[in-house]
Image: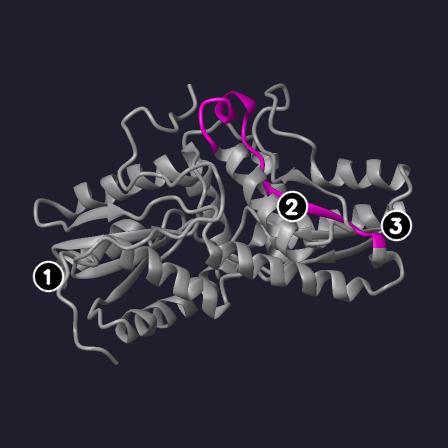
Amino acid sequence: MTSTVTTGYDAVLLVAFGGPEGPDEVEPFLARVTAGRDIAPERLAEVGARYLTAGGVSPINGRLRALVPAVTADLADRGYDLPVFWGNRNAPPLLADTVAGMRNAGIRRALAWVASPYSSFSTCRQYREDLDTACASAGPDAPLIDRIRPHHDHPGLIETAADRLREALAVLGNGPGGDAHLLFSAHSIPCDQATICDYAEQVDEAAGLVAGRADPAGHHSWDVVWQSRSGRPGVPWLEPDIGDRIDALAADGVRAVAVSPIGFPVENFEIAWDLDVEAARRAQAAGVAFSRARAVDDDPRFVKMIGDLVAERIEPQPVDRAALGSLGIRPDTCPGNCCPGPA
């Protein structure tokens, strides 16, 4: 271990969407997710029933729970004596409770990493608002919390996702997998929101970067698909839906697909249901072999990525900011008009 480095921060905060960890937590979780939205009760019941097929447990909390000691160890190896906290938007440990605990622990200034590397209202700006709300509820002694920048093209994400996609292709084998089509899936958002942020462009660039590393010879065709659509049916969202795309590929003679959940670095229930259940069923019905790449959050390179993003903010001398794409590195502090919310 190197000598302790003095920084302007005294903690790191991991921030995630959160998920239930038992049947009794499903209803409160969905109530938080849909608060202020006009969601039909029968729709909530349908989604709740999906969670109950998995015992009411989303993988995301377990993954964040494992990230806390892993990131703590990585930071310690760099010489940073920084405790690592964890708070969720929609499930315990809730951000407000975590920030209050940080205040009680004497934390004055923290750096927050959000478990989505993309720029949009729900993946970026809303988390900033959540942090502001949590700090306001903690009172005048709440810590000052700065955000780590969006980082869709960081090598710790891209290179790890490429390896996971190669693993998924290997599962398909040399039969139908030899000419498998690659699908890169991310959470859809309303089209009117997509026109005022860089989300779709960042997902597309990340997909291209992963495809180029997983398949440098270009044997496999690929495209971006979308999942987890919600909201009113009449409102257009980003398309194509992954299930619809699988059907179209099957009609064109494609015999296998390998799916990278590029929009979801951390394993969660949306991956488990929308890809492993629904998309896999569509593929089976269409006679298409299906393989899904694992999420990347449990890889040491992903942990190191978080450490790198912390280090670039707290090193006394400027350090090179890792980025593989051409869209440009996002600023540490987003402008006030960045990624506006829904009208």
Q: Nearer the viewer, mark 2 or mark 1?
A: 2
**Quadrant housing residue 166:** bottom right
Q: Which residue is mark 1?
A: 106
Distance Cα–Cα, label 2 vs label 1: 43 Å
Residue at (42%, 18%) from the top-left corner? Answer: 343
User: Residue placed at 56% from the left, 28% from the top?
Assistant: 231
Q: Mark 3 sits on what residue?
A: 255
Q: How is the image coloured?
A: one colour
Disc 2 + disc 1, Cβ < 8 Å: no
Q: Position of residue 49 (x, y in %)?
A: 63, 49
Residue receiving disc 2: 184
* Disc 2 from disc 3: Cα separation: 17 Å
Going from N to C along the chain, the mark reached first, 2 or 3, is 2
Percent of width and height locating residue 216: 68, 54
SS for dot 1: loop
Inspect the image, locate mark 1, and give the three-letter code of the amino acid beneath it.
Gly
Q: Which one is earlier in the sequence, the residue at label 2 or at label 1? A: 1
Report the disc number at residue 54: none
Identify the mark nearer the N-term, 3 or 1: 1
Residue 184 in the image: above or below residue 103: above
Q: Which amino acid type is shown beneath numbered disc 2? A: Phe
* Residue 221 falls left or right of residue 151: right
Tell me, yes or no, if residue 135 can be seen here. yes
Q: Residue at x 90, y 37 (%)?
A: 251
Instruction: Indicate the position of residue 141 as horizontal and vertical percent values.
Output: 8, 50
| Label 3 SS | loop
Magenta residues (range): 179-198
Task: Pick whichever, 281 or 306, lies toward us.
Answer: 306
**Left or right relative to 330: residue 209:** right
Q: Identity of the amino acid at label 3?
A: Arg
